[in-house]
Amino acid sequence: VNVLVNGRAVDAVAVADRGLHYGDGLFETLAVEEGEPLLWPEHLERLRRGCERLGLVAPDAVQLRSEAERLCRGQGRAVLKLIVTRGPSGRGYAPNPGTPPTRIASLAPWPEYPATYNRDGVAVRWCDTRLARQPQLAGLKHLNRLEQVLARAEWTHGPAEGLMRDTEGYVIEGTMSNVFLVARGALFTPALSFSGVAGIVRQQVMVWAQQAGVECREAWLRPEQIEAADELFLTNSLIGAWPIRRLGPREYAVGPITQAIQAALEASGGIARAR
Amino acid sequence: VNVLVNGRAVDAVAVADRGLHYGDGLFETLAVEEGEPLLWPEHLERLRRGCERLGLVAPDAVQLRSEAERLCRGQGRAVLKLIVTRGPSGRGYAPNPGTPPTRIASLAPWPEYPATYNRDGVAVRWCDTRLARQPQLAGLKHLNRLEQVLARAEWTHGPAEGLMRDTEGYVIEGTMSNVFLVARGALFTPALSFSGVAGIVRQQVMVWAQQAGVECREAWLRPEQIEAADELFLTNSLIGAWPIRRLGPREYAVGPITQAIQAALEASGGIARAR
């Protein structure tokens, strides 16, 4: 079994589901190691907060945990994706308050990224597709992801990731990752009050910085400021922290703060380790 | 049978479908009268253009037509919804160019709106939820509809529709309809270059205006300009043209241009008639 829909081992969802019609739902992507979904409490908490913001009934946490365990048991490394939608409904945008949410848990193979990505860093490009500014959805890992699809469709070979700006030209994130820069010993990451996904590892890096006494600020950053950085790295729950090795005209070394963060993420056990 | 997925009479779609994961697709809503989907060529043409803009393989038109006929045959009034997605895929935003699109055709009961809506008009409210400005998706009837869901969830009783502004404060459309105003004998409707859905009936009204010698302009309109109108009406493929009877502090009469448009829409046979 590698898919459970509302706890049942089926790999299909009702055509009437609002996840399909409207993208009316949220998701989480978790790294699984030795059968254990990593950072489970953090992912569940973000899901709960997202449900609150969208007015979705949050799925039962115990049920979700038991479904995740059923899928992950006996697995080595894998990717667990959780989707929660507002459930099925008849025609029209108006939500039906009585309908229970749809829970979808699915397991996918671990993406075998080259070992060099973690060690030496990745090449990154600028995407032309922009992110719209929508404070009501900003930060949420919701199912309206056409912008990411269009951005990711811009290239097929070469760069491991593309960086996206919003419609005002501010850098926000990668198509599947958050971005950090180091300048004069301080960390900066784009503010996400108008668009972007507030990543779990992004949050972990911010907590690490506080504990390590490294200044870390959310800021409105232009491409020039990103490109002028001393160090650059990307984060998400599967990659941990990938140094950026090349972006635009410049090459970047894997710097000491990036390495410290990689070490901290590995030591905390929360992130699948580079092997 | 009232649902066909890729021509098969099943009411479920693969969990792996990108329509569910990303809202990676488009839809059309058609009025059906006496077993006949109305304005079929117009809807199919919009779908085709939408596929082009999203880089989706357009579904086979003959196949889609035969599936629509299979669902609509023997029906009186009903609603036909077509969904086209980029099909199933593995993890990640990158589209898989080889995958055929998913076609979903489904039939729903005709919504029995009160007869007064067409004749006397409807009460309309202002929504707080704003539309983001995203030129790459503007005009498209795509599956990323969280903004409409949030807007429609703002009220449960009373108004038949809510008008939405974009994040800059310009009026764009209703949650499920386009909006027109009449001022000094001319028609105005919001420009849709940054957000909104370019409705089929909206287009028909614009063509009618040209033929009738009534000036019709797309414009950037503020709520005050909407509220100061001589006549106001809403359009979509199911409602045809609903006069707005009340919006904010004012009451509006059903004016002569609104009535002429209602008559023209009914005469053209393209719109389900008020009964």
Image: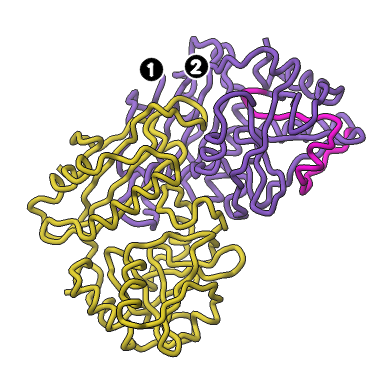
Chain colours: A purple, B yellow
Residue for badge 1: A1
Above or below residue A104? Residue B41 is below
**Label placed on residue B38:** none
Residue A154 location, quadrant? top right
The residue type indicated by label 2 comes to: Pro
Foreground mark, 1 or 2, reads 2
Q: Chain of mark 1?
A: A
The residue type indicated by label 1 comes to: Val
Percent across and percent down for residue B17 are 38, 33
Q: Residue at x 25, y 55 (%)?
A: B41
First to last magenta residue range:
A214-239
Percent across and percent down for residue B237 are 29, 63
In the rendered image, the residue lying farthest to the right is: A184
Magenta run includes residue B87: no
Above or below residue B82? Residue B214 is below
Regarding residue B114, the answer to whether it shows in the image is: yes
Badge 2 crowding class, 10 Å Cα cut-off, few under 14, some 14 to 19, many 20 or more, is some
Badge 1 crowding class, 10 Å Cα cut-off, few under 14, some 14 to 19, many 20 or more, is few
In the rendered image, the residue lying farthest to the left is: B74
Identify the secondary structure beneath mark 1.
Answer: loop
**Label placed on residue A109:** 2
Percent across and percent down for residue B103 are 29, 39
Q: Chain of mark 2?
A: A
Regarding residue A6, the answer to whether it shows in the image is: no
